[in-house]
Image (spheres, grey):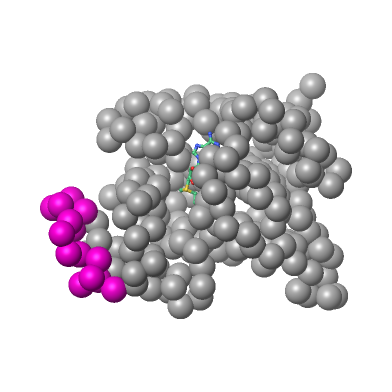
Amino acid sequence: MSRCCKLPSLWLQCSRIHSASRCLKSKTGAEHRWLERHFKDPFVKEAKKQSYRCRSAFKLLEMDDKRSILRPGLCVLDCGTAPGAWAQVAVQRVNAAGSDRDAPVGFVLGVDLLHVFPLEGAVFLPHSDITDPDTQNKIQEVLPKGKVDVILNDMAPNATGIRDIDHQRLIGLCLSVADLARHVLVPGGTMLCKLWDGSESHRLQKRLMQDFAEVRTLKPQASRMDSSEKYYLAKSYRLQR
Ligand SMILES: C[S@@+](CC[C@H](N)C(=O)[O-])C[C@H]1O[C@@H](n2cnc3c(N)ncnc32)[C@H](O)[C@@H]1O
């Protein structure tokens, strides 16, 4: 489970402070352990060095390097975009800011319940629930042709700490993105979907196998080994009527 979502206020404080000793003062045992791990984490250090908003950038970078999800010119919908690390990677890889003058220019639209700080090359719909029909209409209005080539879904609901409930809520979110895909994803398109593994994973996998020609399970190195987090990468979308 992504800790930048599980302990968001702590994560925000610490990403601002950038000093372990100052941040560790007056914290509870659980917060203390989380912060210690956070400051030792090589992906956190590397994210700071490369100016990524969150360590999760390295998950997408690795999955894209291995599985070729993004390329210049593609149009991307990033569901659960805050704080914006995946959007940073997507902007670079689809050339949404037009930094490479010789390559086609892509488009990145990020949606989140939370506020997202602006990012050159990306359009954000903050304070928006992806499951809300109003948000889904707005997404279609904002997209250049009303369609996307790639849907990235790294959403995470507020964790209750009860594994089964959190798992089922996340599967519910993934299934609503699969429903949204039927309206916005181009035939042949790709969907990358984060889940916390559990008893309902097969239901999501079955649904993706129905809608896409190819579905793979991925576990990038930046996804902690002790976490049930994994990703389904679904390629070659079959148009659903
Ligand atoms: C793990 S974080 C995403 C991190 C992001 N991929 C990045 O790299 O910066 C999960 C995000 O999902 C968002 N989220 C959860 N439920 C949502 C919903 N129904 N609609 C939109 N966003 C949602 C949360 O607000 C949170 O910011």
* Relative to 97, residue 82 above or below: above
Q: In the rendered image of this protein, does residue 114 appear above or below residue 105?
A: above
221 vs 136: above or below? below
Taking depth in this image into account, of 205 and 91 the one nearest to the observer is 91
Is 4 or 217 nearer to us in this picture?
4
Give the side of residue 207 with respect to residue 227, left or right: right
The picture places residue 54, in percent across and down from the top left corner, at 46, 61
What is the magenta segment's predominant secondary structure? helix
The residue positioned farthest toward the top in the image shown = 241
Name the residue at 29% across, 68% down.
Answer: 39
Q: Is residue 175 left or right of residue 99?
A: left
- Residue 67 is left or right of residue 222, and the answer is right
From the viewer's side, name the closer residue of 201 and 134. 134
Left or right of 176, for residue 94: right
Which quadrant of the figure has residue 94? Answer: bottom right
- The residue lying at 44 percent from left, 73 percent from top is 48
Q: Give residue 177's position: percent from left, percent from top.
A: 61, 33
Is residue 228 placed above or below 88 in the rendered structure? above
Regarding residue 187, the answer to whether it shows in the image is: no
- Magenta residues, as a range? 19-33
